[in-house]
Amino acid sequence: MAKGTVALETFKDRLRLRWGYAGKRYCLYIGLPDTKVNRFAAEGKARQIELDIASGNFDTTLKKYKTDRQVQRSQLKTVELFEKFMQEKAKSVYQRSLEKYKATLGYLRQYFKEKQADAISVALAEQFLEWLCSKISPVTAKERLTLINACWEWGINEEIIENNPWNDLVARVKIPPKQKSKPFTREEIQMIIEAFRSDRYYSHYADFVEFLFGTGCRTGEAVGLRWGHLSDDCSSVWIGESVSRGVRKSTKTNRARTISLTPHLQSMLLARRPENPDSDGLVFPTPHGHAIDDHNFRNRAWKTVLAGLNIDYRKPYNTRHTLISHALDLGMSPVMVAQLTGHDVATLYENYAGSVSSRPRLPELMKDRE
């Protein structure tokens, strides 16, 4: 592009102008879709900027070339932009997910204070990332940065801001590898279930624990299971809902699945099934008939029972990891296991296949010593 020339281009079906002046790159969003009439108007704006550059009257703030609405929006503060984004997301995300947005807002407020959103350059965004990584773990930092990047993308689509300085920063956050927890052995599984059944305080949860180990479902899926989700003879179960902290929602992947249960699980469920069960009634309620709070269950019942057995602590969610690992070791097809647990095959191998015989093995190249 020749010096002093303003280029007209289309970005996400919207017109924008790009040019350089005094060693700095400039971008101006026209805020109009790419049509013949709108191109004519945008070209007129481009000629105005070129004349100002040539005559020495170029406005580096770009206010001269923006509409009143664009000028007003460009004065939006960083925190205000993210608050608008949160208000929009609150219409579709669950309350627990919204807590992550609130935490991200706190970091933006702490660092940027009153700074305007369109004043955040790539260099300033990099400085924020460095500061953020000094405060929280890489995993959490990447999560927060992903939300910030989504906010700016939303702002561009809504024509509130014009540039996204966060686009390439998310990939820069490297998460160090973390050793996966061990699956429970068959002996440990039996010991845990029997310990729950004989426990003075927590025997009520024995069937719940057995169902977790036996199906590999997510904890919230077992908590939210209703009698209407089971077939009449309890030989199969439909899993399409989850309950967490008292909130019922769809499964983590927003996909439902129906699985056939083992005769052992079928017998256990038939034994606890009321004579005329309410289809909306919980299969595994608390002793008082409420939905199990996974946090309380983990900290009170689960930790207590494992400590009493002197078994290394692993979260209740490890029951899922345990079933998948043992299923793969027994030679079950990864595709079939993924269908049972609601994963894609790649995710299953990457995150859950942690037992020895399901790992790739090195070839033996050396002879044994005599």
Image (cartoon, rainbow, N blue to C red):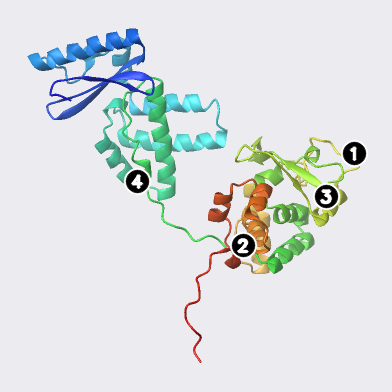
- The reply to whether residue 297 is visible in this rendering is no
Q: Amino acid at mark 4?
A: Arg
Please report whichever mark, 3 or 4, sits nearer to the chain's N-terminal start: 4
- SS of the residue at dot 4? helix
Q: Quadrant of the N terminus?
A: top left
**Spatial CA span between label 1 and label 4:** 57 Å
Q: CA distance from mark 2 to mark 3?
A: 25 Å
Q: On residue 183, which mark appears?
A: 2
The residue under label 3 is 269
Disc nearer the start of the sequence (4/2): 4
User: What percent of the width, then of the height, locates residue 124?
Assistant: 26, 36
Could you say which disc has been placed on residue 172 in the image? 4
Which callout, 3 or 1, points at the residue further toward the start of the chain?
Answer: 3
Indicate which disc residue 176 carries.
Answer: none
Q: Amino acid at mark 2?
A: Pro
Q: Position of residue 261 (x, y in %)?
A: 78, 51
